[in-house]
Amino acid sequence: MSEVTGPGATATSIAAAVSAGEVTARAVTEAALSRIVALNPRLNAFTDVLAERALATAAQVDARRAAGEASGPLAGVPFAVKNLFDIEGLPTRAGSLINRGRAPAARDGALVRRMEAAGAVFLGGLNMGEYAYDFTGENAHDGASRNPHDPSRMTGGSSGGSGGAVAAGMVPLALGSDTNGSIRVPSAFCGLFGLKPTYGRLSRAGSFPFVGSFDHLGPLGRSVADLALSYDAMQGADADDPAQAPRSPEPVSGAIEDGAGGLRIAVLGGHFARNGDPDCFAALAHVAAALGAEAPVELPEAARARAAAYVITAAEGAALHLDRLRERPGDFDPATRDRLIAGAAIPAAWVHRAQRFRRWYRERVLALFDNVDILLAPSTPCRAPAIGQATIVMDGATLPLRPNIGVFTQPISFIGLPVCAVPVWLDGGLPLGVQVIAAPWREDLALRVARALERAGAVGCRVAAG
């Protein structure tokens, strides 16, 4: 087996090898499909495998190269997407039972099309929490996605299949969504790099929404270069997403090797120094030490920001699903249904207050970036819990697990800041994660710092054995 057809190959190495004619896109695709056949029955990452389409696309990539045409920056790179992305010819299930009765999508989602336009090879749809209202990766209809590093453990959610597929070596890149932490949590639990761009940076057209004012789309991968390569390929204006910011593409791949020198880096304290296992704070200290970051900074009212995020999430999510709740309540995961029903009962005055606070909080947090360039925080309060685990101990109190996994991610996505999640391995056990947070539109800085950590060996991805 060629090094670039093996499970640990990065997207960057595959694209370089295919472009140079050292390996065919078909060979890479066939190897990825073989791993899916071998591993998916145990890990439950994929819900839809499009083998014929993938092989046809790979043949097109190889034909273009043979004709002397440009192969594209992602030439021959296999990828898959969370099944809330539209996939031509399939209903967009969004992890639900109800959506399976929808008409098949007429075309792929915008980011799927952009990845393929860059030469990538699309392999299929990935498991996720129902309607993205999930932090665990457990799906009541398709079963739990399982952590490749320990299949008795959660992948995290709601982009659980995306995390599992990349960590298992089935694909080098996967796309997910992040509303309150759904890229960063699987990145932490599965030991991957993940990028949640600035809100409004990448088009969300052709994806099933959860909370329109929080939803982000982005990649999970095995290296910082892979995140940068895919992120650059997906940038660009799209009139089909009315929330997308009117900004020209700002490529980052050329800047990720610039290092962290000269950047002002601070560690988040207060809310981000409580409510977690000692291991999650040890991972943060490990990253901070590698960067020489010592100055603590507090986000004003971060706990209140998390509470306000909950109010808006529940209310917006419920509004989206009201007709389905009335007509087919028994076809929801009961846990999802009950949260949505509770959201429908939230007084409008509460939502108004949460939105007013959101503006106040955003202004105060952005003021911090006058004095710092990067903020560091844990990604999750613990390592990957066991599948079926219902509670977590936080600061001595036993609390429900599901709503508290996002204790550190929600105050960040609440105001749409860009984050690169980095994987930390402190011992022989399961991985942990750290958020590298930048000011709006400065994905380049977050990725530079992540790459500096990766280059120094402080963080990195490990493909699961077997």
Image (spheres, rainbow, N blue to C red):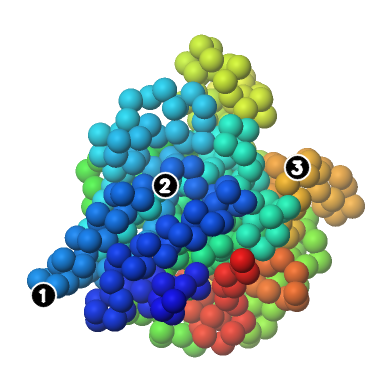
Q: Nearer the viewer, residue 416 or 338?
A: 338
- Whichever of labels 2 and 3 marks the residue nearer the N terminus, that label is 2
Q: Amino acid at mark 2?
A: Val
Q: Residue furthest top?
A: 327
Q: Which residue is mark 1?
A: 68
Q: Which residue is mark 3?
A: 388
Horizontal relation, residue 270 to residue 173: left or right: right
Distance from Cα at disc 1 to Cα at disc 3:
53 Å
Q: Does the image show residue 175?
A: yes
- Residue 402, percent across and down? 70, 42
- Residue 318, percent across and down? 54, 25
Please tell me the numbered disc located at residue 49. Answer: 2
Q: Quadrant of the N terminus?
A: bottom left
Position of 112 relative to 255 (above/below)? above
Using a 10 Å C-alpha cutoff, classify the residue at mark 3 as few (fewer than 14 neighbours), some (14 to 19) or many (20 or more). few
What residue appears at the point 60 percent right and 17 percent down from the top-left corner?
A: 330
Q: Amino acid at mark 3?
A: Gly
Q: Amino acid at mark 1?
A: Gly
Q: Does the image show residue 362?
A: no
Q: Quadrant of the C terminus?
A: bottom right
- Whichever of labels 1 and 3 marks the residue nearer the N terminus, that label is 1
Distance from Cα at disc 2 to Cα at disc 3:
26 Å
Secondary structure type for disc 1: loop
Secondary structure type for disc 2: strand
Q: Nearer the viewer, residue 46 or 240?
A: 46
